[in-house]
């Protein structure tokens, strides 16, 4: 699954993935986490959205409903549709404070 959007790379510790997923789940209470690899996950807003992404791919109607998180070495990358969305800004702030 490949999306367009913005890659935001921030230096972080290895536990950043766990912290990010917990924060996202506190905001998207029905979030679905799909592990791609040990250091890469897709977090969908809910199961219905995950299914739509699987069926349709990166369609404009699905903007800001999924976050792709990649943690490698001491850097975390967030792949998002809108780098200025409230959730993205919150995640970026959290990562910078780790």
Image: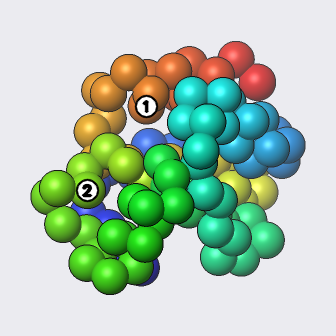
The answer to whether 56 is drawn above or below residue 5 in the figure is: below
Callout in the foreground (1, 2): 2
Cα separation, mark 1 vs mark 2, equals 16 Å
In the image, is 5 to the left or to the right of 47? left
Which quadrant would residue 42 be assigned to in this image? Answer: bottom right
Residue 28 appears at what percent x and percent y? 55, 36
Give the residue at x 52% y 61%.
47
- Which circle marks residue 47 in the picture? none
Closer to us: 66 or 40: 66
Going from N to C along the chain, the mark reached first, 1 or 2, is 2
Residue at the farthest left position? 60
Which quadrant would residue 24 be assigned to in this image? Answer: top right
User: Do residues under tags 1 and 2 come within 8 Å of each other at their CB atoms?
Assistant: no
Considering the numbered disc 2 on the image, is that residue within a helix, a strand or a loop? helix
The answer to whether 22 is drawn above or below residue 89 in the figure is: below
Residue 34 appears at what percent x and percent y? 64, 68
Residue density around tag 2, few if under 14, some if 14–19, many if 20 or more, within 10 Å: some
Closer to us: 46 or 19: 46
Residue that numbered label 2 is attached to: 62
Give the residue at x 65% y 76%.
36
Which quarter of the rendered picture does the C terminus lie within?
top right
Residue at the farthest front position? 48
Residue density around tag 1, few if under 14, some if 14–19, many if 20 or more, within 10 Å: many
Residue that numbered label 1 is attached to: 88
Q: Is residue 11 visible?
A: no
Q: How many marks on residues? A: 2
The answer to whether 89 is drawn above or below residue 22 in the figure is: above
Considering the numbered disc 1 on the image, is that residue within a helix, a strand or a loop? helix
């Amino acid at each position: 699954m490949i999306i367009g959007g913005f890659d935001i790379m921030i230096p972080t510790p290895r536990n950043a993935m766990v912290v990010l997923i917990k924060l996202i789940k506190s905001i998207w209470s029905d979030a679905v986490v799909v592990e791609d690899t040990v250091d890469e996950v897709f977090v969908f807003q809910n199961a219905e959205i995950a299914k739509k992404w699987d069926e349709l791919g990166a369609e404009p109607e699905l903007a800001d409903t999924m976050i792709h998180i990649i943690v490698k070495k001491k850097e975390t990358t967030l792949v998002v549709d809108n780098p200025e969305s409230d959730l993205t800004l919150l995640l970026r702030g959290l990562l910078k404070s780790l």
